[in-house]
Amino acid sequence: MSAVNLAQVRGYKARASRRTHHCSLGSNMKTFLVFAVCLVAAQALTDEQKEKLKKHRAECLAETKPDQQLVDKLKTGDFKTENEPLKKYVLCMMIKSELMTKDGKFKKDVALAKVPNAADKPAVEKLIDTCLANKGNTPQQTAWNYVKCYHEKDPKHSIIV
């Protein structure tokens, strides 16, 4: 299995989200069990994907040396602080997730190929195109702009940082 792919995770979450709408209600115990099953189905990442993401984060933190507190803020959607080590960290995560090349070229074909549900591809492609419209003058600025945009437009599926 390749590195965590944002489009793949997004497709999984969309399917899991639809599954939660099909959960029926009944007695208290039945409702609890159905809720618990729906909650498990809605989890986005497999254990293997979580481990890869954790490994990528550790490698990118070591390689780019950003302030750990600023990286943690990115996870909550706080993109207010913009500095080179942080931008390089984001680019590193995009590269290790196989979504971007070192020169800042987004691999849209790779991202779309990993969307498991064909019906989700047009929406994913539209979001990708929207977020790629604001290219930077450096690869790390392009990666930063993309991840920031994606998080602003679809925070539930933004897990790359």
Image: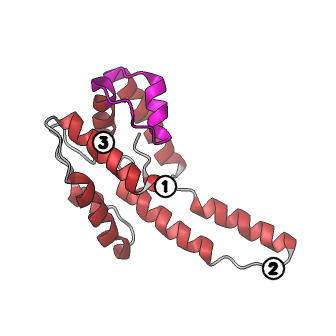
**Label 2 close to label 1 by CB (< 8 Å):** no
Q: Amino acid at mark 3?
A: Met
Residue 113 is at least partly visible in this image: no
Write down the residue under mark 3.
94
Q: Amino acid at mark 2?
A: Gly
Secondary element under disc 2, as helix, strand or loop, is loop
Whether residue 28 sits left or right of residue 21 in the image: it is right
Secondary element under disc 3, as helix, strand or loop, is helix
Q: CA distance from mark 3 to mark 1?
A: 18 Å
Write down the residue under mark 2.
26
Residue at 46%, 63% in the rendered image: 12
Q: Which residues are magenta?
A: 62-86
**Label tally:** 3
Pinpoint residue 5: horizontal percent, then vertical percent: 36, 52
Task: Say which label, 3 or 2, has the lower sequence index.
Answer: 2
Q: How busy is the neighbourhood of tag 2: few (under 14 within 10 Å), some, or many (20 plus)?
A: few
Write down the residue under mark 1.
156
Task: Say which label, 3 or 1, has the lower sequence index.
Answer: 3
Q: CA distance from mark 3 to mark 2?
A: 44 Å
Q: What's the mark number on residue 91?
A: none
Q: CA distance from mark 2 to mark 1?
A: 29 Å
Residue at 38%, 29% in the rendered image: 81
Q: Amino acid at mark 1?
A: Lys
Nearer to me, 134 or 94: 134
